[in-house]
Amino acid sequence: MKRTMGIVMAMTVILAAGVATAAMKGSADVVKASATPSEVSARAGQRVEIAIDLDIAEKWHIYAHGDTNFIGVDLVPAESFPLAEFRAEYPRGHKAEFFGETVYMIDGKDQIKASALVPADLTAGEHELAFGVTVQACDDKTCLAPVDLPVSVILKVQ
């Protein structure tokens, strides 16, 4: 009988831990990032333009790039990024107050515009342009753990 009770109690603890873990959200649960277009073509010496679409769930927000109080959105090319002169233009967001601090928030749908130069020596063919989009989502009461959302684009060099 004691053994049965011990097993039942252990299973109860395991199930409770599983329910608590399932209830926890991370920033990736409420923020999605995708590239538009998902494929680009260019010749050596040309700049390519890419848009990273941000889709933030209702009642959640992220912070504008460069925010000094919280983790602002950031678009970072992967180490294997084959292009040069990378530039990103971030959404400004709207001015608000969060926990007594003036911040710039981004909510709903918005876009990061990026461009880079195809180097003269990049071989013809397909190359993956991989990025990480750093975000930290918050609602009016709490912030979720920051995350790097993976996004990639296929570059066809002619």
Image (cartoon, grey):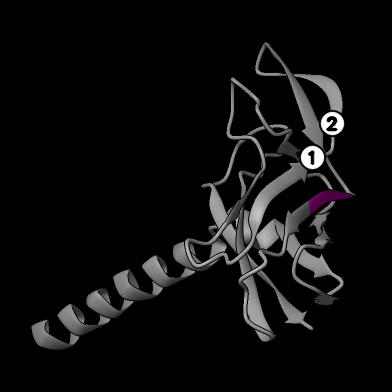
Image quadrant where one finds the C terminus:
bottom right
Q: Which residue is mark 2?
A: 92
Q: Is residue 8 above or below residue 37?
A: below
> x and y percent of residue 69 in the render?
59, 21
Whether 101 is among the magenta residues is no
User: Would you identify the image quadrant in which residue 115 lies?
Assistant: bottom right
Q: Does residue 25 show up?
A: no
- Residue at (79%, 39%) from the top-left corner? 90
The amino acid type found where label 1 is placed reads: Tyr
Q: Which residue is mark 1?
A: 90
Q: Is residue 91 above or below residue 133?
A: above
Q: Does residue 125 show up?
A: yes
Whether 111 is among the magenta residues is yes
Q: Indicate which disc residue 53 carries.
A: none
Give the number of marks.
Answer: 2
Task: Report the span colored magenta.
Answer: 110-114
Q: Is residue 13 left or right of residue 40?
A: left
User: Would you identify the image quadrant in which residue 33 lies?
Assistant: bottom right
The amino acid type found where label 2 is placed reads: Arg
